[in-house]
Image (spheres, rainbow, N blue to C red):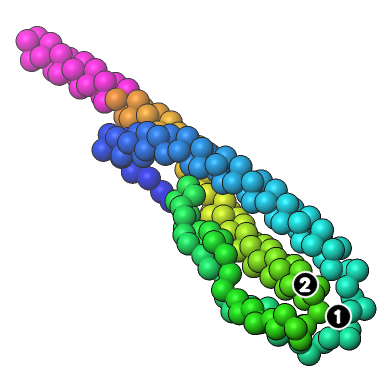
C-alpha cells in the first residue's frame, strides 16, 4: 500500500474516493448480473440450434446412400458464401446478431435431376444456416464472456481492494489527526502553564 499523507486534505481525498467507489460498485454488480444472464440466454440458444441441426442431419441420414451416388452434383447444390449479421449492444458490449446466410443454390433441371434433390437442397441449406447461426452465437458468447471477466475483476477490485483500502486510510488519517489535535492541546496547556508560572515568578 502506498504511503499516504496524514492530513485533512488527504482525508477528504480518501473520503471522496470511497464515495465514488461505493457509487460505482452497484452499477458494476448490476452489469455483472446482466452479463451472466445474457450468457445463459446465449447458451440456451446454442443448445437449441444444436438440437435443430441434429434433427436436420437425422433427416438427411436416410439419403446417405443416394448422396454417395450423386457426389459431384450434390456438392454443388448449396455453396456457402458468408453469414449475414447485424450488430446489437448488451450491457455496453457490441455483439454480432445472426440474420441469415448468403449462399448459391444450383439451378435444378426438373428433367435431369432426381426429385429428391429439391428436398436435399433445402435441408443442406438449413444445415449451413444453423452452422452459421451457431458460429455467430459462439462469437456473442466469447465477447460477452470477455466483458464479464473484466467486469468481475473490477467488482473484485472495488470490493476487496479499493473500498477496504480507502476505509483503512481514513481510519489511519483520523487517528493521526486526533493524535495531533490531542498533542496540540497538551502542548497548549503546557505552554499556558509555563506562561502562568513565569508571570507568578515575575510578580513575586
Q: For label 1, count other residues whose C-alpha is less than 10 Å away and answer few (under 14), some (14-19) or many (20+).
A: some
71 vs 136, left or right, is right
- Residue extending furthest bottom? 72
Q: Does the magenta stretch mainly form a helix, a strand or a loop?
A: helix
5 vs 127, left or right, is left
- What residue is pinned by disc 2? 120
Where does residue 171 sit, x and y in percent of width and height? 43, 31
Where does residue 75 sit, x and y in percent of width and height? 75, 85
Q: For label 2, count other residues whose C-alpha is less than 10 Å away and answer few (under 14), some (14-19) or many (20+).
A: some
- At x 15%, y 13%, the residue is 196
Where does residue 172 sit, x and y in percent of width and height? 42, 34
Residue 82 sits in quarter: bottom right
In front of the other: 166 or 177: 166
Disc 1, SS: helix
In front of the other: 62 or 110: 110
In front of the other: 122 or 111: 111
Q: Magenta stretch?
A: 182-204
Residue 137 sits in quarter: bottom right
- What residue is pinned by disc 1? 67
Q: Is residue 7 visible?
A: no
- Residue extending furthest front? 111
- At x 17%, y 14%, the residue is 197
Examine the structure image and report whether residue 70 is included in the region drawn in magenta: no
- At x 72%, y 80%, the residue is 110
Disc 2, SS: helix
In front of the other: 136 or 106: 106
Examine the structure image and report whether residue 192 is included in the region drawn in magenta: yes
CB within 8 Å, label 2 to label 1? yes
Where does residue 180 sit, x and y in percent of width and height? 31, 29
Amino acid at each position: 500500500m502506498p504511503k499516504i499523507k496524514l492530513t485533512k486534505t488527504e482525508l477528504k481525498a480518501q473520503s471522496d474516493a470511497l464515495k465514488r467507489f461505493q457509487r460505482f460498485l452497484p452499477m458494476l454488480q448490476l452489469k455483472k448480473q446482466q452479463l451472466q444472464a445474457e450468457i445463459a440466454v446465449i447458451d440456451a440458444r446454442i443448445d437449441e440450434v444444436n438440437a435443430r441441426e441434429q434433427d436436420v442431419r437425422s433427416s438427411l441420414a436416410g439419403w446417405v446412400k443416394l448422396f454417395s451416388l450423386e457426389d459431384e452434383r450434390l456438392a454443388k447444390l448449396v455453396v456457402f458464401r458468408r453469414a449475414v449479421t447485424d450488430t446489437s449492444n448488451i450491457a455496453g458490449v457490441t455483439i454480432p446478431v445472426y440474420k441469415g446466410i448468403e449462399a448459391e443454390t444450383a439451378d435444378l433441371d426438373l428433367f435431369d435431376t432426381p426429385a429428391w434433390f429439391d428436398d436435399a437442397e433445402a435441408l443442406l441449406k438449413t444445415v449451413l444456416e444453423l452452422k452459421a447461426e451457431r458460429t455467430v452465437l459462439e462469437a456473442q458468447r466469447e465477447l460477452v464472456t470477455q466483458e464479464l471477466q473484466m467486469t468481475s475483476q473490477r467488482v473484485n477490485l472495488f470490493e476487496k481492494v479499493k473500498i477496504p483500502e480507502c476505509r483503512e486510510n481514513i481510519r489511519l488519517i483520523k487517528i493521526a489527526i486526533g493524535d495531533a489535535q490531542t498533542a496540540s492541546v497538551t502542548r497548549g496547556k503546557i505552554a499556558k502553564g509555563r506562561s502562568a508560572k513565569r508571570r507568578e515568578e515575575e510578580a513575586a
